[in-house]
Image (cartoon, rainbow, N blue to C red):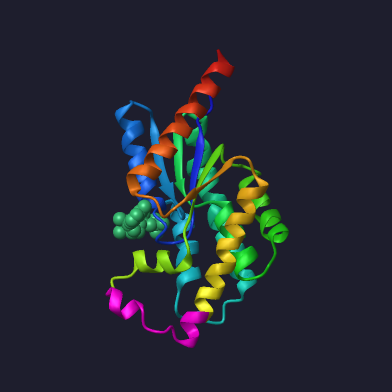
Amino acid sequence: MRGLFITFEGPDGSGKSTQLQRMASYLNAQLYDVLTTREPGGTAISDQIRRIVLDPEHPEMAEQTEVLLYAASRAQHVQEKIKPALEQGKMVLCDRFVDASIAYQGFGLGFGEQTVQQINDFATGGLTPDRTYMIDVAPELSRERMNTRTTQEFTQELDRIEQKELEYHARVRQGFQTLAKQHQRIMLIDGNQSIESIHQLIVQDLLNLIKARTDSHS
Ligand code: ADP
């Protein structure tokens, strides 16, 4: 049986990787064969592409180029790592996938959902997660979780650039929420809950999914 492809989405600091790791430990303890991965996925080609995207020597990089390079890196990650693992029946847990590009580049940068979806459909050959756990938090909270600044510093008024950034992140959040409404595979989770409560929600859902699949194959 083909493995399950599970993705974790949400803004930085929403708690995606914490949940992914918790789930991987849980599944490993249940003796499932699990692959955890995140882009660029540790593939040599994807790593090189990522280096170009992040190279500070190239501030002239067009946003279109960036969208295509991220998609190129993802294509390699899918072909070299994700697809073979699924074919071997592994449970693949991936930190971010196409939904993130749609939220950040489609909604955040304003390229539009359809354009980013089409580019990524080509890149992934249409590979779609079986289930996506999307953690929803306000931009202020994700920033707080990422930040080591003290609470006192936080309450200070945001400067113009920080405010602009928050507007961008608000668009990204709206993008994630829009996707959650469109696709049944996406479970939108309130990220204000404790790590343990969110983990329990995900475990329950995933166990149901595994059971439904096993039943349909027996
Ligand atoms: P992401 O992968 O989405 O960037 P992380 O999983 O790395 O986020 O979490 C960012 C920080 O927030 C970590 O210090 C983590 O322990 C903390 N954190 C994660 N989930 C929660 C939660 N539900 N409540 C409080 N803190 C959390």
Q: Residue furthest top?
A: 218
User: Left or right: 79 with respect to 106?
Assistant: left
Residue 121 part of the magenta segment: no
Query: Which residue is depicted at the point 47% across and 35% down?
Result: 85
Residue 68 found in image quarter: bottom right
Task: For residue 90, say whether it is visible.
Answer: no
Total numbered circles:
0
Split into 4 quadrants, where in the image is the C terminus?
A: top right
Of residue 107 and residue 69, the one placed in the foreground of this image is 107
Residue 158 part of the magenta segment: yes
Query: Which residue is depicted at the point 35% across and 49% down?
Result: 194
Q: In what quadrant does ligand 1 lie?
A: bottom left
User: Left or right: 193 with respect to 161?
Assistant: left
Of residue 72 and residue 185, the one placed in the foreground of this image is 185
Task: For residue 101, say whether it is visible.
Answer: yes
Query: Which residue is depicted at the point 46% across and 38% down?
Result: 92
List x then y, in percent, for residue 70: 55, 61
Q: Which residues are magenta?
A: 150-163
